[in-house]
Image: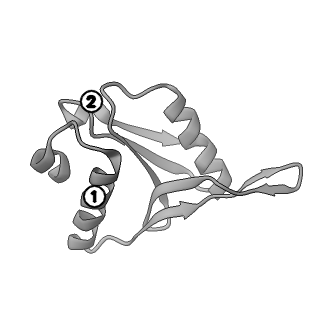
Amino acid sequence: MEVHKALGPGLLESIYEEALCYELQLQGIAYERQVAADIIYKDHVIKGQRLDLLVEKEVVVEIKSVSKTPDVVISQTISYLKATNLKRGLIINFGERRLIDGVKRVSV
């Protein structure tokens, strides 16, 4: 909320990612940025997927900056959760006028 309040909507996702990471650091919350998430297909490892953030080694955070969050982002986040064997995800769309409208919890 603090990041959106300070920056407002309309910036690039990378700007919000950097600001959110800084805010997490200020709050003493552990996170990893751009974490590789391998996909397994018939015992074959496919590399190339990256999580925007992994918070406290438990929550996958997907950052967006669009006027309306596309439905495919939910599927994408669920795929990330399955790939990492984690249960909780959070989609944060900084493009919404009110951030409360851009936050979606995802679980598997």
Which residue corresponds to the image point at 32% horizontal and 38% vertical from the top-left? 65
Tell me the quadrant of the picture where the C terminus can be found.
top right
One can see residue 104 in this view:
yes
Q: Nearest to the eye among marks 1 and 2: give it.
A: 1
State the CA–CA distance, disc 1 to disc 2: 18 Å
Which residue corresponds to the image point at 66% horizontal and 49% vertical from the top-left? 82
Assess whether mark 2 and mark 1 are in contact (beta carbons under 8 angstroms).
no
User: Disc 1 marks which amino acid?
Assistant: Leu
Per the image, label 2 sits on a secondary structure element best described as helix
Question: On residue 70, which mark appears?
Answer: none
Q: Label 1 belongs to which residue?
A: 20
Q: Residues within 10 Å of mark 1 (few under 14, many from 20)?
A: some
Q: Earlier in the sequence, mark 1 or mark 2?
A: 1
One can see residue 85 in this view:
no
Q: Is residue 63 left or right of residue 20?
A: right
Above or below: residue 5 compared with residue 22 = above
Percent x, y of residue 42: 89, 49
Q: Looking at this rendering, what residue extends furthest in the right direction?
A: 42
Q: Is residue 1 left or right of residue 18?
A: left
Taking depth in this image into account, of 19 and 79 the one nearest to the observer is 19
Taking depth in this image into account, of 39 and 14 the one nearest to the observer is 14
Tally of numbered discs: 2
Percent x, y of residue 104: 38, 36
Per the image, label 1 sits on a secondary structure element best described as helix
Q: How is the image coloured?
A: one colour
Percent x, y of residue 85: 65, 56
Taking depth in this image into account, of 68 and 48 the one nearest to the observer is 48
Image quarter of residue 53: bottom left
Above or below: residue 95 compared with residue 55 = above
Q: Label 2 belongs to which residue?
A: 101
Which residue corresponds to the image point at 47% horizontal and 48% vertical from the top-left? 89
User: Disc 2 marks which amino acid?
Assistant: Asp
